[in-house]
Amino acid sequence: MICGVDEAGRGPLAGPVFAAAVILGGSHGITGLADSKKLSARQRDALAVKIRQGAVAWAVASASVEEIDNLNILQATLLAMQRAVEALTSAPTEVLVDGLFCPRIALPARAVVRGDSSVAEISAASILAKTARDALMLELHAQFPDYGFDRHKGYPTAAHLEALRVHGVSAVHRRSFAPVRSLLSDA
């Protein structure tokens, strides 16, 4: 059985990075799988329900803002991926990871560039990681409403950068990312 792995949230200035691992199995019957960035929020949410119901196994994991700042974003992403694979309730025979790098796991693994557009299991993982991260960013918006996390999910939009300048750096901002780091050094 093939497991697909993908991440969500490498580029934002705030919040954890998420990863998901999904084993679909041969007869999953889920149509419409695609790279999560190419789907609307409504499409992602609907597909996420189908994936969680129809997959042989799935898991979502994350690496915290502190881990991102201590390790760097690539290593934190790989850590989240490792956690997701290790949380699966069924062991895959091979792990296919979107991108250029594979996490440290005790299973055969292969990186697939643009795998989220070409491998159904990676597309499914992309959708689960994105919907889980977006849901957390809505929760963080309730705690930190001044930053607009409900709209930009922590990405460095003009509105987010302006909110950082006006309100300062919150507890959920990644201090190692240049725009946040420069604000802290200016303060």
Image: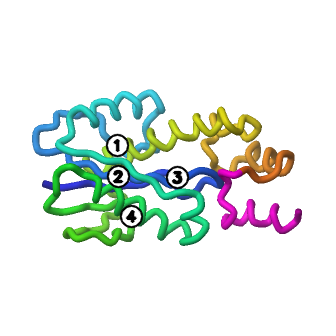
**Quick one: 58 or 25, which is closer to the camera?**
58
Instruction: Report the magenta residues as a range.
Output: 171-187
Q: Secondary structure at mark 1?
A: loop
Dot 3 and dot 4 residues touching (CB under 8 Å): no
Labels 3, 2: front one = 3
Q: Which residue is mark 3?
A: 9
Residue annotated with mark 4: 99
Q: Earlier in the sequence, mark 3 or mark 2?
A: 3
Please state the horizontal and vertical placement of residue 116, each as a whole percent of the image: 35, 52
Is the Cβ of the residue at disc 1 closer than 8 Å to that at disc 2? Answer: yes
Which residue in the structure is indicated by mark 1? Answer: 34
Amino acid at dot 1? Ala
> What residue lies at 47% left-to-right and 51% top-to-bottom?
8
Q: Is residue 118 at least partly visible in the picture?
A: no
User: In the image, which is nearer the foreground, mark 1 or mark 3?
Assistant: 3
Residue visible at 49% across and 65% down in the picture: 76
* 32 vs 14, nearest the viewer: 14
Looking at marks 1 and 2 on the same chain, the residue that comes earlier in the sequence is marked by 1
Q: Which badge, 2 or 4, is on the more N-terminal residue? A: 4
For residue 155, above or below residue 150: below
The crowd level at tag 1 (other Cα within 10 Å; few <14, some 14-19, many 20+) is many
Q: Amino acid at mark 3?
A: Gly
